Amino acid sequence: MKKIFNSLIFKLVLAVTLGLIIGFCSNESVMNVIVTLKYILGQIIFFTVPLIIIGFIAPSIAKLKNNASKLLGYAVSLAYISSVGAATFSAIFGYILIPKLSIQSTTESLRQLPELIFKLDIPEIMPVMSALFLSVIIGLAVAWTNADLFEKLLDQFQGIVLSLVNRIIIPILPLFIATTFATLAYEGSITNHLPVFLKVIVIVIIGHFIWLALLYAIGGAMSGKNPIEVLKHYGPAYLTAVGSMSSAATLPVALSCARKSKVLRKDILDFSIPLCANIHLCGSVLTEVFFVMLVSQILYGQIPSVSSMVLFIILLGVFAIGAPGVPGGTVMASLGLITSVLAFNETGTALILTIFALQDSFGTACNVTGDGALTLMLTGIANKKNINNNEISENI
């Protein structure tokens, strides 16, 4: 029971509940304080966004050494294609389904929020796109020059950033979300949209199963093997991911499930499953794309343009490869994209963080189960390219 109370999802549910109650019951004086607190917490969170981008993207690229085997290149490429494909699939159905949900924009007839008591600005150290470009060029330069010392520094910096996320951002996140929902309730913009969020969560989970079916069908075609011989063993891994909300935490169970399959090469899965647990986040990406489109329609009165979504999806695939394998890692790593490419404000970002976290366990389960399909694809590629054990072991 104590573990449940300490879980992030319980804290977020509690934050949403308390925020709604406070927002419905508070007067203008109380909301003065809440709006100010929300602004300050938002400044702290968004200050760390460029650090998160550099801390996770640069080390991930740096680890792709010049002497990496072809199989590593295939694995990263398949993970990127799967994530971008899932995001594109989600966006297409978002444009089709979201207008049919009869969502009314909340930009009109809202109760006016009170002014800030005081304004504390904490500017980011650099723009988000600058952080992304810096991460890419540093990561590539380290890989090209085999700069072992700098690679270790990047690894240590990644640990520092992950510590900041775990010790500062995650603890203040429930408070930030509570203040956000308090302002939404005070304005009157949240009351009519909770049923819509519940419907969309169901739609997204159905989307996960459709994408998994497609991945396994492709895996079967590429390997010439029956994909059911892999998928039927993944039940325990799926349930573990639902409970843990972490691909990294599910890794031992996923390895055990994959090893039960008769059609996967053991040398391939020992390489692929741990790698894909960190770089293949198709379920999380699918979820995030649909949710950003929904929130944009609710808060800003329109779905992002096709050009904005195309840019967002292409970059999100890169961010997914470098995202930390922790609950909510994908959306945390891509906060910069949400604010810069899609122009979300603090309210929109907090809403995305909340609804993403409330269903993140199902996205993680899709990620983990999809790793089996990618391993099946890699088995087929390795057999056709005659990639042997020695080439694979170089990357384990």
Image (cartoon, rainbow, N blue to C red):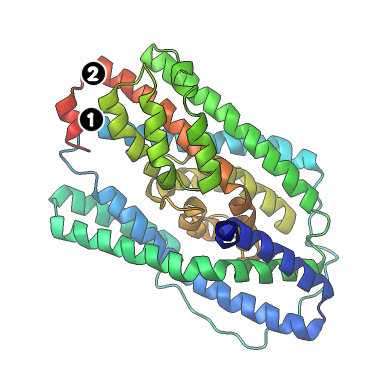
Q: Is residue 301 visible?
A: no
* Label 1: how many Cα within 10 Å (few below 14, some 14–19, many 20+): few
Q: Is residue 356 visible?
A: yes
Relative to residue 47, is residue 3 depicted above or below? above
- In the image shown, does 226 or 340 lie closer to the viewer? 226
* Label 2: how many Cα within 10 Å (few below 14, some 14–19, many 20+): few
Instruction: Decide if residue 353 is on the left or right side of residue 252.
Output: right
* Quadrant position of residue 180: bottom right
Image quarter (top left, top right, bottom left or bottom right) of the C terminus: top left
Which is nearer the N-term, disc 2 or disc 1?
1
Residue beneath label 2, please?
385
User: Residues under labels 2 and 1: Cα distance?
Assistant: 9 Å
Amino acid type at mark 1: Lys
* Quadrant position of residue 178: bottom right
Residue beneath label 1, please?
70
CB contact under 8 Å: marks 2 and 1: yes
Amino acid type at mark 2: Lys
- In the image shown, does 361 or 28 lie closer to the viewer? 361
* Quadrant position of residue 69: top left
Task: List x then y, in percent, for residue 259.
Answer: 35, 26
Image quarter (top left, top right, bottom left or bottom right) of the N terminus: bottom right
Using the image, tell me which numbered label, if any, was put on residue 20.
Answer: none
- In the image shown, does 356 or 83 lie closer to the viewer? 356
Which element is circle 1 on?
helix
Task: List x then y, in percent, for residue 7.
Answer: 56, 58
